[in-house]
Amino acid sequence: MQTTLTTENSTAVLYCTKGGEHSGERIQMICTHPLCRTDALCCVICKSRTHKHHETVLLKTFLEEMSWKTRHSQRKTGDVIQKEVEQAERMCLEAVVGIKRYTMQKLVRLEEKMKIAE
Ligand SMILES: [Zn+2]
Ligand SMILES: [Zn+2]
């Protein structure tokens, strides 16, 4: 099975939306803390503030692991694959939820800007 996730395409355009000292900071990590499921994307500032004591994985590493697991999962058997695939899918979904939220925020901001301009 081929995965379409590539580190270059998915990280290049993601910037933190929190503004202030976050502006211009690239999203580099995903927080794996249960409380951060809907706000899992972190820049270095987020990491040092909101997610200080949380466990994070580098976005790059996360995506690489994901494609590695997909490629190598056929070597293992039964339950192990099942569990790993389920876990990978869940993490992937959570990341996608975060990215969707990010895009929505961006759109809302754009709309606000357009309203001001009118
Ligand atoms: Zn940030
Ligand atoms: Zn966190």
Image (cartoon, rainbow, N blue to C red):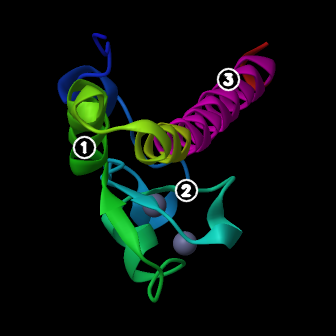
Instruction: Classify mark 2 as within 8 Å of ligand 2 or not, answering yes or no.
Output: yes
Quarter where residue 110 is shown: top right
Category of crowding for the residue at label 3, using alpha-carbon neighbours closer than 10 angstroms: few (below 14), some (14–19), many (at least 20): few
In the image, what residue type sits under mark 1?
Glu
Q: Nearer the viewer, residue 44 or 81?
A: 81
* Residue positioned 38% across, 35% down in the render: 14
Can you say whether 45 is above or below 93 in the image?
below
Q: Position of residue 38 (x, y in %)?
A: 69, 52
Which quadrant is home to the N terminus? top left
Instruction: Classify mark 1 as within 8 Å of ligand 2 or not, answering yes or no.
Output: no
Q: Position of residue 33 (x, y in %)?
A: 57, 72
Residue denoted by label 2? 40
Q: Give me the C-alpha separation between circle 2 and circle 1.
A: 17 Å
22 magenta-colored: no
In the image, what residue type sits under mark 2?
Ala
113 magenta-colored: yes
Instruction: Identify the secondary structure beneath mark 2.
Output: loop
Residue denoted by label 3? 107
User: Which portion, as a residue range, is magenta?
Assistant: 88-115
Q: Give me the C-alpha separation between circle 3 and circle 1.
A: 30 Å
